């Protein structure tokens, strides 16, 4: 049985981490796999999923080499730019797959980060991107395109529905945001949208699920805009789906988005998702551009139309579910990934 070692520099649990867990869980009978990252909130997740976790105290070449020697993999599956670059520097002689989960802003122009990744591309046997935009918008696309394959994330609809029913959450909200509270996910825009809507409907209600380096900023902005009675910050939840089940409309105002996992997950729960249309979101909604908003007024107009028209809301909810179902084909996803491992 071939051995695959997954590397990721993050110690949190979000989109890329979820993808790694999904890969390991679905290939456990075909490959021996382990997850390698710094210690942190991811620890409990991996323990609950019974996934082997190799911990690095410092995510650098020296410590990666140590874990490679300990696990002795046939294949290294490195997730995102930092892990890919460091793995390329270890001198590992087996197959290396670089899996890019984000459409990184730095990769769109020449700078020290993009130059370093450009130089490391020759070390990778395959490069996976979660949307076509990861390749198309990269400044080094010509160097990468002959190794590149788009692999949209597989999303387990059955599991999401099951999680949504794991506990009862009684509160109801008009709008929701869930994801990391950082600059790329643009939680400030969400708060601005609520502020805009409050001028038209003082009872508008919203919830934010997630944590990150902008958490305190978001708290202060909510207070500054006098939205304490309109926006609730719940922080990180291991299972946010019972909360989402109680909401009406999702907002994904990201500045950069590799795939758009949170949008897909929400739509699988029959929730319309308005979004910025950047990166992978543009591909998800390419045939349904009425869900894409370019400014605060467009968000507000679309939200109010759905909140005030049950027929329109239900039509968009059904359409959203159909869009999301395209990403729930497990066997097709496994076939593409398996081919990269065994070729």
Image (tube, grey):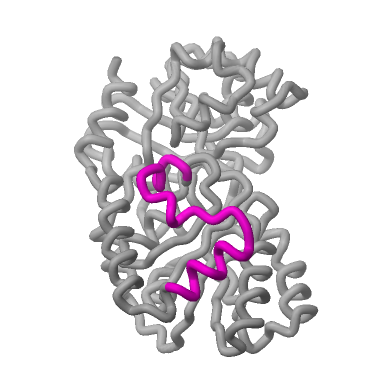
Q: Residue at x 48, y 79 (%)?
A: 174
Q: Residue at x 54, y 66 (%)?
A: 177
Q: Main secondary structure of the magenta part?
A: helix
Q: Residue furthest left?
A: 331
Q: Which residues are magenta?
A: 282-305
Image quadrant containing the C terminus: top left
Residue sitting nearer the eye, 272 or 82: 272
Q: Residue 308 lies in magenta, yes or no?
A: no
Residue sitting nearer the eye, 180 or 174: 174
Residue sitting nearer the eye, 205 or 70: 205
Can residue 13 be seen here? The reply is no
Q: In this picture, is 15 found above or below 100?
A: below
Horizontal and vertical percent position of residue 101:
50, 38
Horizontal and vertical percent position of residue 239:
43, 68
Q: Residue at x 45, y 73 (%)?
A: 305
Can residue 229 be seen here? The reply is yes
Horizontal and vertical percent position of residue 32:
32, 34
Q: Residue at x 59, y 71 (%)?
A: 235
Image quadrant containing the N terminus: top left
């Amino acid at each position: 049985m071939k051995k695959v070692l997954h590397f990721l520099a993050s110690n949190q649990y979000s989109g890329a981490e979820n993808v790694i867990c999904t890969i390991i869980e679905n290939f456990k009978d075909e490959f021996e796999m382990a997850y390698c990252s710094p210690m942190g909130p991811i620890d409990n997740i991996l323990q609950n999923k019974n996934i082997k976790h190799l911990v690095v105290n410092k995510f650098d070449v020296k410590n990666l080499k140590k874990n490679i020697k300990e696990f002795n993999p046939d294949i290294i599956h490195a997730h995102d730019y930092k892990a890919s670059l460091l793995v390329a520097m270890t001198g590992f002689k087996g197959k290396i797959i670089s899996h890019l989960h984000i459409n990184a802003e730095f990769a769109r122009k020449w700078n020290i980060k993009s130059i370093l990744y450009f130089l490391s591309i020759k070390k990778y046997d395959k490069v996976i991107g979660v949307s076509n935009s990861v390749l198309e918008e990269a400044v080094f696309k010509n160097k990468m395109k002959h190794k590149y394959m788009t692999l949209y994330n597989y999303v387990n609809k059955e599991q999401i529905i099951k999680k949504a029913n794991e506990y009862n959450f009684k509160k109801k909200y008009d709008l929701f945001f869930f994801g990391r509270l950082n600059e790329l996910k643009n939680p400030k825009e969400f708060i601005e949208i609520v502020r805009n809507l409050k001028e038209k409907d003082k009872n508008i209600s919203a919830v934010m699920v997630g944590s990150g380096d902008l958490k305190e900023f978001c708290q202060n902005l909510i207070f500054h805009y006098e939205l304490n009675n309109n926006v609730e910050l719940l922080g990180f939840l291991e299972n946010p789906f019972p909360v989402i089940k109680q909401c009406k409309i999702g907002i994904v105002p990201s500045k950069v988005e590799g795939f758009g996992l949170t949008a897909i997950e929400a739509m699988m729960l029959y929730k319309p998702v308005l979004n910025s249309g950047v990166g992978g979101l543009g591909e998800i909604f390419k045939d349904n551009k009425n869900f894409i908003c370019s400014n605060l007024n467009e968000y507000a107009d679309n939200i109010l139309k759905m909140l005030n028209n049950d027929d329109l809301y239900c039509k968009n909810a059904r359409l959203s579910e159909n869009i999301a179902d395209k990403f729930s084909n497990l066997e097709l996803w496994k076939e593409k990934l398996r081919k990269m491992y065994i070729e």
